[in-house]
Image (spheres, rainbow, N blue to C red):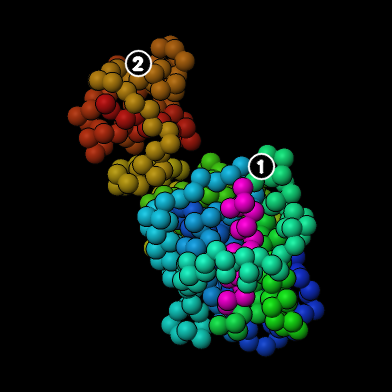
Amino acid sequence: MHNILEELEYRDLIKDFSNRDEIKELLDTKQTIYCGFDPSMSSLHVGNYVMISFLKRLQKAGHKIIAIVGGGTGMIGDPSGKSKERNLQTEESLKINTQAIKEQLERFIDLSDPKKGMIINNYEWLSKISLLDFLRDYGKYFPINYLLAKDTVASRLESGISYTEFSYSILQAIDFLMLFEHQKCAIQVGGSDQWGNLTSGLELIRKVKPGSKVGVMTCHLITRADGKKFGKSESGALFLNKEMTSPYQLYQYFINAADEDAIKYLKVFTFLSKEEIEEIEKNHLAHPENRIGQKVLAYEVVKDIHSLQDADEAVLMSEVLFSGDVLTLNKKQLEDVLGEHAIEVQGDKLLEEVLIEIKAASSKREARQFCSSGAITVNGERVSDPQKMIVKADSLFGVYTVIRRGKKLYFLVKHV
């Protein structure tokens, strides 16, 4: 890549610029660049990781990175993308979330030198601004018409928006001004749904510090196969906390990406070079049945977000489903791999009864047919006798029995 801007555009990361030529000019020299992260939950998610990887690319190109954890703005709540008023968080939950988000960001951003990267909580300055100072020093720069025209406000006028959320954009603008004044921060980046908030920051700096060279740019919101964004409030959100989304679940999501998404995601989520991605794309298109793109993508994402060990383990766990060697899994791995298929079964029962109860067979005749044809395995062993007793005493970890029908259909019996 000739420069960082070309790389970001090759990866189709940038959606909007305040002014592309001005941003390019700024990026040609070392800059301080910031992005904010909302502590509305105790973990960031894969949608946030797009912005984290964006910052990492900028940092590798020699720019100083500042990640803002919104302990101050989080007390208000960003109305962006919300159709109704948020529930305000308690100070205690916000404090816990802010610390958790800070610890996650520390894993990804190089903080070895303050000249390379910093993580700051905007509560430090927002909490010190009095109401009168807020109105006099900042509110006066924002005409009501200007704020009403913001998408985040305009989209809520019919359903209703409180003054609290209405003022959110000004708070984020104050962040940019503060970082500009105290850290010489000239560029702010964010998701495309943040455009209104980012441009408010530009507006404030240009009015308070006329002639300042500042700019903003936004990332495309990366969508899932169903068209929804990788959001934390969507069902099936992919969290960066491995206790909330295991490395295996993350691996499975990306290995099941659609063919048309695999190369797009390789550009967005991985740090493979343009040449490496083009080689993978060539092989991927030549042999789509081998799912080459998806395998590299899933491995790289888990390796970068968690660790090499977690990525290797996710591959092994995936292979277990094809080999049927479920006895090699520990309890946590078994729950990761098959937990969503768990079906509670009361007491000890005949195999044919269990097959019907877990809907692996529709009748006793069908259950017997599956057994006699060798289609049923119990805890990795083929069972041909439909009268075999499935008992808790024989279960894995004293809880589970794994039943497989055919090569791919798995059922997890949870004994209760």
The image shows residue 119 at horizontal and vertical percentages of 47, 73
Q: Nearer the viewer, residue 147 or 384?
A: 147
The residue identified by callout 2 is 353
Mark 1 belongs to which amino acid? Gly
Where is 406 relative to 258, above or below? above
Question: Predominant secondary structure in magenta?
Answer: helix
Q: Earlier in the sequence, mark 2 or mark 1?
A: 1
Tell whether 348 sits left or right of 7: left
Where is 83 relative to 347, above or below? below
Does the stretch in magenta take in 76? Answer: no
Is residue 20 visible to us here?
Answer: yes
Q: Quadrant of residue 25?
A: bottom right
**Magenta span of residues:** 162-179
Q: Residue at x 70, y 81 (%)?
A: 209
* Label 1 Cα neighbours within 10 Å, binned few <14 / some 14-19 / many ≥20: few
The image shows residue 87 at horizontal and vertical percentages of 51, 45
Q: Residue at x 65, y 80 (%)?
A: 186
> Dot 2 lies on which element?
helix
Q: Residue at x 29, y 47 (%)?
A: 330
Q: Nearer the viewer, residue 14 or 369?
A: 14
Is residue 46 visible to us here?
Answer: no
Q: Nearer the viewer, residue 209 or 386?
A: 209
> Dot 1 lies on which element?
loop
Tell whether 311 sits left or right of 145: left
Q: Quadrant of residue 195?
A: bottom right
Q: Quadrant of the C terminus?
A: top left
Tell whether 226 sits left or right of 392: right
Tag in front: 2 or 1: 1
